[in-house]
Image (spheres, rainbow, N blue to C red):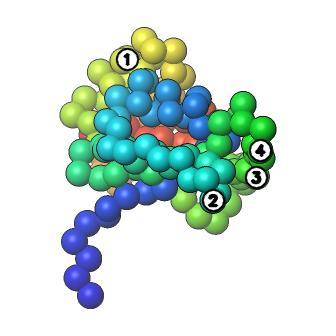
Amino acid sequence: MNLDAIHHAAIIVSDYERSRAFYVETLGFRVIRENYRPDRGDYKLDLACGGVELEIFGQKVSDASYQAPPKRLSYPEATGLRHLAFAVADVEAAKAELEDKGVFVEPVRRDTYTGKKMTFFFDPDGLPLELHE
């Protein structure tokens, strides 16, 4: 098998509009396509981040058919996706930009194994997101 790269990661969100605003307006992801899926009663948003896509699935809380998805377990950590990490040239600059937009970002620290600077912040549902040089 010859796997070339990761094509996309998918996230199920509890509030489609809030998460769309976070990933598009706050983080600056580019919208590739956005579709309502009537058979599932939800939206699918495809976003570009460098050469990788991020898929966001969710319902609008204002929709009459809204059903909140189960909460993600973080403490203790559950099996499955632990976090998404984004490569940046300057962790401190990216951290400052997020903080200017009202996003809480943990203190910068060094990766134990690579020695590179890194930090974490969280999406509206508490999914850990990492900035890594």
SS state under label 3: loop
Q: How many marks?
A: 4
4 or 2: tag closer to the N-terminus: 2
Reading the image, the residue beneath label 4 is 65
Q: Specify the quadrant of the image occupied by residue 96.
A: top left
Q: In the rendered structure, which amino acid carries the disc numbered 1?
A: Ala
Q: Is residue 82 above or below residue 132?
A: below
Q: In the rendered structure, which amino acid carries the disc numbered 4?
A: Ser
Which numbered disc covers residue 12? none
Q: Nearer the viewer, residue 102 or 38?
A: 38
3 or 2: tag closer to the N-terminus: 2
Reading the image, the residue beneath label 1 is 96
Q: Nearer the viewer, residue 123 or 15?
A: 15
Q: Quote the CA–CA distance across marks 4 and 1.
A: 39 Å
SS state under label 1: helix
Does residue 86 appear left or right of residue 43 in this picture?
left
Q: Nearer the viewer, mark 1 or mark 3?
A: 3
Query: Could you say where residue 42 lies in the image, as x and y percent from the top left?
Result: 61, 48
Reading the image, the residue beneath label 3 is 70
